[in-house]
Image (tube, coloured by chain):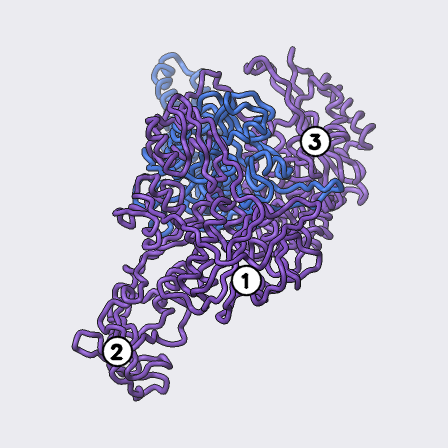
Amino acid sequence: MKFTLAWLKEHLETGEPLDRLVDKLTMIGLEVERVDDRAKTLAPFTIARVISAEQHPNADRLRVCIVDTGTGDPVQVVCGAPNARAGMTGVFSPPGSFIPGKDLTLGVGKIRGVESRGMLVSEFELQISDDHEGIIDLPADAPVGANYAAWAGLDDPMIEINLTPNRPDCTGVSGVARDLAAARMGKLKTVPVAPVAGAFPCPVSVSLDFGSTPSLCPGFALRLVRGVKNGPSPDWLQRRLIAIGLRPINALVDITNYITYDRARPLHVFDAAKVTGDLVVRRGRIGETLVALDGKTYTLDDSMCVIADAHGVESLAGIMGGEASGCSAETTDVLIESALWDPMNIAQTGRKLGINSDARYRFERGVDPSFAIPGLELATRMVLDLGGGTPSSITAVGDFNPPQRVIEFPLREVERLGGLRVDPAEVGRILRDIGCSVAGNGPSLRVTVPSWRPDIEGKADLVEEVVRLVGVEQIQLAPFDRGDGPRKPVLTSIQRRTRRAKRALAARGLVEAVTWSFVSKPQAELFGGGKPDLALANPIASDLSDMRPSLIPGLVMAAQRNADRGFPDVALFEVGQIFQGDQPEQQLTAAAAVRRHRAKPTGGRHWSTGGHEVDVFDAKADALSLLAAAGAPVQSMQIVAGGPTWLHPGRSGTIQIGPQNVLGWFGQLHPKTLQVLGADGPLVAFEVFLERIPEPKARATRAKPQLELSPFQPVERDFAFVVPRTARASDIVRAAQGVDRKLITNINVFDVYEGPGIDPDKKSVAIAVTLQPREKTMTDEEIDAISAKIIAEVGKRAGAVLRG
Amino acid sequence: MPDIDALEQELNQAIAAAGDEAALEAVRVAALGRKGSVSELLKSLGAMTPDERRQHGPQINGLKDRITAALAARKTGLAEVALEARLNTETVDVTLPVPDLPTDSGRIHPISQVIDELTAIFADMGFAVAEGPDIETDDLNFTKLNFPEAHPARDMHDTFFFNPKPDGSRLLLRTHTSPVQVRTMQTQKPPIRVIIPGRTYRSDSDQTHTPMFHQVEGLVIDKSSHLGHLKWILAEFCKAFFEVDDVKMRFRPSFFPFTEPSLEVDIQCRRDKNEIRFGEGEDWLEILGCGMVHPNVLRNCGLDPDEYQGFAWGMGIDRIAMLKYGMPDLRAFFEADVRWLAHYGFRPLDFPTLAGGLSS
């Protein structure tokens, strides 16, 4: 919403300076977005006459002008404008002035060897229009030496407010003035509208025809004015429209635009000569088209409301008129429409057709129904004043005065909700100033809400009115009592896991990424997603179309982007939501990481580590470290060979607690996965689902179990087994462990060997077994006996023989 | 009786000449071994007369002691030489760089860090953390929150939708974390004190908007909390979060469908190039929206607005992270550029606490 200071002062008697008014607007909820104070920005520019304009000696397109700036001392200016000529009157910019359209401060310069002491400027250079065809060409009688902005009436500051959608009343200058008056910034002085008597009945009738469907038009009023002389509107009106960024068209159209901004009352004018028969307000018919005033053709349907004559649709109700019946300079008989429309329907239609008009802006917020007829009277008055003619009486259908809302308002609500004590007299004063009628003087008021404030529905809204107009800054800070509840942890189990997961992974040298929750459909499908219920109907881009079933594709793509930037060793993780369906319980929290190239936890290429490439065991270590940190029961987890199809079948594993509860996967990415993702490896990854970690048993005490220390030294014995190549280390360890679960406290696989000395289909696996005696030192015989058992057991369960 | 002095001289020369422990040992054996020269002398004492023994005993024993001492001294000297020689071969290049610790190279994303900071601040004030799903119903994202059907307020939210179901309903990606307020009020009995961090989505993309971003909201419902408490909480929050002694705040009336009265909050700051300082300067910077929970929202959640009241606020996590830590561009948050993450991210052990300081 835009207006100028002078315009505002037509409705508000005030001595307040601009900056005070601007601050107050913001502080009562009409946030000022921009103030364009042209008296300031255009101060240096004066009216000047070109005495002579000669061809520049060194440039075909330039002229050397001698300019009379009114100081009695003509200056030489080099000018490149095609319209620069001797005798013309223009606008002069002296050296040292800031040219807003060029964003530069002018200096004295030489242009192709000729000195230039200033500039003749275009409207574009002053940012008063887009016209940069030539320099400003003023009438010959413009006073040389005078300030251009003041002479042209451009010195009226323009104020733009960022209007919230709840304030339809402030889509008009009069409403803004009313609010400022209520905030004690002056006195409201909007002139009441006097009715204009009709000289004859309106020859065009209006009917509402919605059949059995709900009416989209609560009221419609129309009047004809005959014998109007249309043409350009007067300067003051044109200037005002230009100041707020509107293009003057002709007096009749300008009047409707003016009243739209002045009183928040959109109107429409038809050229009566182009309207055939009577008007019908109805729903559009599917496939009907209208060429609107913006020159575009719109295809309508039966959700939209139109105004039609005998020929068909003439106007898109409350949004935009039709080109065919619009008013031109030749119009002599004009039909003025002032109507009420269903706000929801206007919003839907506007959105559907993509039309943002000043009328839509107001109707979808809700215009004042009681001002429909006065608005029509005001428009008639202006038409008569500017173009003459004879008005008909008004023909109207519908109801322009719906019942007004009455709110029972206990005064204590202001303190209860607002934390602010306000004198009851002041509450009454504020409510009256915004247009309410207020009855009662006890603890509760009966407040009748004015027709222009559809946003005031109940007590809380009245509290807001009082609080904002008294001033939010008046509310004193009140310490908030945290209560005497116990200081307990506030995070849920999954929240704790999530934050521990992040810290644990970062501690392994992984860097946390936050990637989009959506991926492309092929990516989603590759990871088991891509179902229709998780596809966006209106994705922002085709590669962000489906909710992600896994964090891996986003991380792989991110790793590849880094590689493409020249950083091949990337270790990224993310902990975030993944989607298995569209229901809340189908959203899981996953933790995942990828490591690329040499981004091992021990560091990249380094003299001390040899700089190996990442492998499946790095991903496994990441996953297990995360699970331990997140509180998973590490003892009961099993690692099973293989994983989902997007992992390398021979270099992947599944982490589970029994086959029913899969906690996650790790492995090297399948070459085909890399191909679909457009990434290259080596790349290893893991993904774990935090919700699937079993909840630990609640414990009554924080004390840890008693520590039992054996006084006897542990014994370590090494065993090297030769096993088939396909044998699993976990089977060997489990077999050895099973020999004596109490005595054997640790088994460490310390060597795996394939190669010379071992059959090609075999490998050697060496384990160190720690025996911890508790009652006495073990004898050699006892150690030998248990060793023999281990050899036998591993032999039986893992097909192992002791390496000779 | 050989010449003891000559023997001593000869042995001392041999000890001095021994170049290593083996040579020295040979000298020792030759002198003090079973058939050594000094041992032989000692043996000869047995065949002497008492007088001779009285005369030669001290001489011979003295010789033995001196030779033993000389051998020991020489041994120590040789050991030191040998150690020095060994150490000379054991030199390494200590200027070689050591590998980086994973805890030095790992990083926590600023969004996670800021969520941890927010949690620390609000947990201290008695707030729990509530969360909800990203995929929401129209009812919880809009209708229950008092957005009228087709009202322009819905236009302020560029919503991502899913395809309609057979029954005509369609799900959407939440445009704010406010549906979690509704879920909380529907399932918990007041008093309610929660903060709600989470991912939110709007189909918007430019330098300051990304289709996905993060919000945190706060919700207080009880029988007495009003705008004065809201102002206090937000002032406390701003001081704690921006880690300054004082923040000047400006509360402006505004509009949100789900609060009444509604306010927007600006904080005073000074902007120099890429740096923003709070608690000084003349600029106002909008950081959050807030207000008293709208009576219709309370009613929609089954609470009587004449009995219960409360307030809510909401702000962008990414935005306050940018303000505090000075990232210039929101889009970079989601690009996973390791250079950006290494620079703006946090070390895994930098855990924000109120006791130790949020960021120091």
Kindly report which numbered mark, 2 or 1, lies closer to the viewer in this rendering.
1
Residue type marked 3: Ile
Residue reaching furthest left?
Answer: A72
Badge 2 vs badge 3, beta-carbon distance below 8 Å: no
Sequence-wise first label, 2 or 1:
2
Task: Tally the marks.
Answer: 3
Residue A148, position as x, y percentages in the image: 28, 68
Residue A674, position as x, y percentages in the image: 69, 52
The answer to which of A271 and A651 lies nearer the viewer is A271
Badge 2 vs badge 1, beta-carbon distance below 8 Å: no
Residue, disc 3:
A767
User: SS class of the residue under badge 1?
Assistant: strand
Chain B is shown in which shade?
blue
Whether residue A629 can be seen here: no
Residue, disc 2:
A49
Residue, disc 1:
A270
**Label 2 crowd (10 A; few <14 / some 14-19 / many >=20):** many
The answer to which of A528 and A216 lies nearer the viewer is A216
Sequence-wise first label, 2 or 3:
2
Chain A is shown in which shade?
purple
Residue type marked 2: Arg
**Label 3 crowd (10 A; few <14 / some 14-19 / many >=20):** many
The answer to which of B275 and A658 lies nearer the viewer is B275
